[in-house]
Amino acid sequence: MTVWDDVIGQEQVVTTLDRAARTGEGMTHAWLFTGPPGSGRSVAARAFAAALQCPLSGCGECRECRTALEGSHADVRVLATEGLSIKVEQARELVQEGGLRPSVGRWRVILVEDADRLTERAADALLKALEEPTARTVWLLCAPSTEDVIITIRSRTRHVRLRTPPVEAVADLLVRRDGVDPAMAGYAARAAQSHVGLARRLARDEGARIRRRDVIVMAGAIRSVGDAIGAAHDLATIAEEESGAASAERDAAERARLMELLGADAAARTQPPHVRAQLSSLEREQKARATRFGRDVIDRALLDLLSVYRDALLVHLGTPVALVNQDAVESVQTVARAFRPEGLLACMDAIGLARERINANVAPLLALEAMALSLRVEPRSAG
Amino acid sequence: MSDIPPLVLVRGPEELLADRAVAAVLADLKVEAPDLDVVRVGPDYHSGQLVMDTSPSLFGGSTCVVIEALHEASEDLHADLLDYLAAPAEHVTLVVRHAGGPRGKKVLDALVAGKARIFECPAVKSDRDKSDFVTNEFRRAGRKVTPEAVRALVEAVGKDLRELAASCAQLVVDTEGVVDDRVVETYHGGKVEATGFRVADAAVAGQAGEALRLLRHAIATGVDPVPIVAVLAGQLRQVVRVGSASRGASSAVLASSLGMAPWQVDKARRLASGWTPEGLATSIQAVAAADAEVKGGGRDPVYAVERAILTIAEARAAGRR
Ligand SMILES: [Zn+2]
C-alpha cells in the first residue's frame, strides 16, 4: 500500500511527484494541479502532501500519511471552498500560516482546492507568498486548467496535469475502495464519464440514478415549444431537488453546531444580537454554497444530456466504441433516429452554449429554455 | 358601545394585517374609554410583570395589554399568561399577537377556550393573493377599481405589501371615481418593475417602436437592463405555458395549476393569440442571448436588449401574416 493508491490513471504524474518527495528532484515551493472535474486533482495533491510528510515518502500507513490524507495533519492546511469565491481575508490567513515553520512535520503544506475561485485581490495576496518562498513551506494549488488562474501565479508554480482516468480504473477504484459490486461499478464509472466522485454517488444512491435517467430520456422527447419550456422547467426542478436534498440536513447541522459553539439557546425564537449576526453570516455562506451547488448540479445534468447526443453520433458513425449510456441504449437509438449527424452536432453546441451561459450568470432557467428549444426533434429530420 | 371581548387573538404571519387588527381593536376600545391605558409587552419581559400591568390602578379606568409576539415570548411570559387566563381581570382587554409556529400552543388553546375574538392574518404572497388584497383595499374605501388597475398596481409595487397598501391609500385619497390602469400609470409609471412590464408588454404585443421608446426612457432614467430582460423572459414563458395548456380549462383552474394569478393567465391568453410556437421559440432564444450580453458578455448591453425587442416584434409580426 502507498499514498498513491487512490490516484488512478495518472502514472506519469505519480512518477513525478513520488520522485520529488523521495529524492527532492524537481522539488519546488509551489505546484499547480490541473485536470478536468472528477479527475482527482485534490486527491493527487493530498497524496503528495502525505508523501512529503511521511518518513518513508508515502508509505500510506504511518500516522503522518493517514492524518495528511484525512486532512487532520497539523502542518497540512486544506482550503476547500464551498462558496463561489475565495476572499482576500482567507488568502491572507493562508499567507500568514505559510510564513510559519512546520510544527511537527517535515514541511508546511498549504493546499488550495479551488484556486480558480480566488478573487483578484485574493490572488494578489497569495502571489506575494509565492514570490518570496519560505524555506519549508509548499503550496499546492488545484484548478480545472491553467487558464483558470492568473498568469503571474501560473508562472511561479510547477504545473502537474492530470488526465481523465480510464473508465476501468474508476470502476476498479469503486470496487476496491468502496466495496461496490463490479457490475454496478462499471455502469457508474461509464455513466459518470470517469468523474470519480460522481461515479461513487451513482453507485451508492438510487435517487441519483433515477434523476440521471430522467435527464437522459429527455433527449429525443422534446417535440413542441411547449415540450421544450416544460423540459427546461423539469431540468431546473431536478437540479433544485438534488441540491435541496443534499444541503438541507447539512445546513441544519451547521446551524446547530454554531449555536452550541456560541452557547445560545436553540429553542429561543429571538437571539441576542451577536448570535444573530453570526447566524446571518452563516446563512449567507450557505446560500452562496447552495448557488454554487445548484449550478454544479445543472452542469452535471447537462453533461449527462450531452453524452446521449455524443453516443447517438457514435451510433451514426458506426464507431466501435463503448457508449457512455450503455444502460440506456433505447434512448440513444431514439435520438440517433431522430437527428442527422449535423443535427446532433447542433444539439451538442446548444448544450455547450447553455453551460457557458449559466457559468456567465445568465438566469439558469432562461439558458435551459433556449437550449431545450434547440433540442426539439423536427418532424422533417425524423426517419 | 364597544363590542370587543376581553380576550383578542391576532394570529398569522402577515405583519401589516396584524398591525391593522391591533390598531382597529385599540381604536374601538378608545371610543368607550378615551383615557385607555395601553401597555405593550415586547421581548424584554420580566417574570411577574403581567400581574402588575393587569392589577387595577388607584384611579380606576381601563387597560389594554398587547402581547407583541407570543411566538417569540419567553417561558416566563407563557407561564404568567396562563395564570392570568385562569383568572382574567375585569377592567383589562388582553390582545395577543402570534405569527405562527409551535411556541405558545398552551396559551393559544387557553385563549380559544376563553372565547377570544380571533383575527386571522394569513400571508399575502402569490400575485393572486396580492390582487385580492388590492381589490379588498379599494372595496373597504368604498371605491371601484378595474381589474387592469389591480394588475398594474401589483406589477408596479407588489413586491412589498406595505408599499402596496400605501399606494392603494394614496390613490383613494388623491383620485376620484373609478380607479383604472391610466390612473395607476400616472402615479406609478416610473417604477422599475412597471417599466420592465411596460417594455415587455409592448414588445410581446409586437409594438417595436413603443417598446424601444419605453426602453430608451427607462435607461435614460437609470433603470438597469437586467431586470427588463428578466421580465421579457417571464412574459414569454407565461405565454408559452398558458398557450400549451389545454384550451378548455378556465383561467382559475389554469392559474392554480401554473401558480399564476387569474389576470396573468387572461393576459397571457390574450397575448398568445397573435403568436406562433416558432415565433415564441425565436423570441426566447433572443432574450437568452440578450441576458448573456447584459450580464457582461457583450460590449453594449442596451443594444443587446434593443435587438431582442426587435426580434420579438418581428417574430410576432411573422405569426400574424
Ligand atoms: Zn507514511
Image (tube, grey):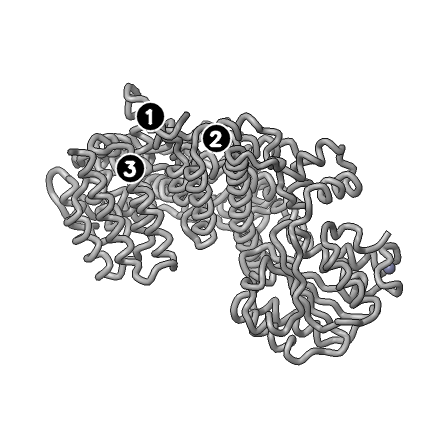
Classify 10 Å Cα crowding around label 1: few (below 14), some (14-19), many (20 and above).
Answer: some
Residue linked to disc 1:
B245
Tag 2 near tag 1, CB within 8 Å: no
The residue nearer to you, when weighing B201 against A346, is: A346
Check if mark 2's residue and mark 3's residue have beta carbons within 8 Å. Answer: no
Residue B309 in percent (x, y) is at 24, 48
Residue A68 x/y as whole percent? 79, 59
In depth, the one of B213 and A3 nearer the eye is A3
Q: Mark 3 points at which residue?
A: B280
Q: Quadrant of residue B151?
A: top left
In the rendered structure, the answer to whether residue B301 lies left or right of residue A57 reads left
Residue that protrudes farthest toward the top in the picture: B248
Residues behind callouts 1 and 3 on a single chain: yes
| CB at disc 1 and ligand 1 closer than 8 Å | no
Q: Which residue lies furthest to the left in this view?
A: B177
Q: Distance between the residues labelled 1 and 3?
A: 15 Å
Q: What element carries label 2?
A: helix
Question: Which amino acid, mark 2?
Answer: Val
Chain to which mark 2 belongs: A
Callouts 2 and 1 in the same chain: no
Return the chain for callout 3.
B
Measure the C-alpha gap from mark 2 to mark 3.
Answer: 24 Å
Looking at the rendered structure, the number of numbered marks drawn on it comes to 3
Residue B66 higher or lower than B217, as above or below = above
The mark closer to the camera, 2 or 3, is 2
Residue A335 image label: 2
Q: How far apart are marks 2 and 1 (CA)?
A: 26 Å
Q: Residue at x 33, y 62 (%)?
A: B299
Badge 1: chain ID: B
Please rate how many residues cluster around mark 3, counting C-alpha atoms within 10 Å: few if below 14, some from 14 to 19, many from 20.
Answer: many
Kindly indicate whether the residue at mark 3 contacts the one at mark 1 (C-beta within 8 angstroms).
no
> Left or right of B190: which side holds A38?
right
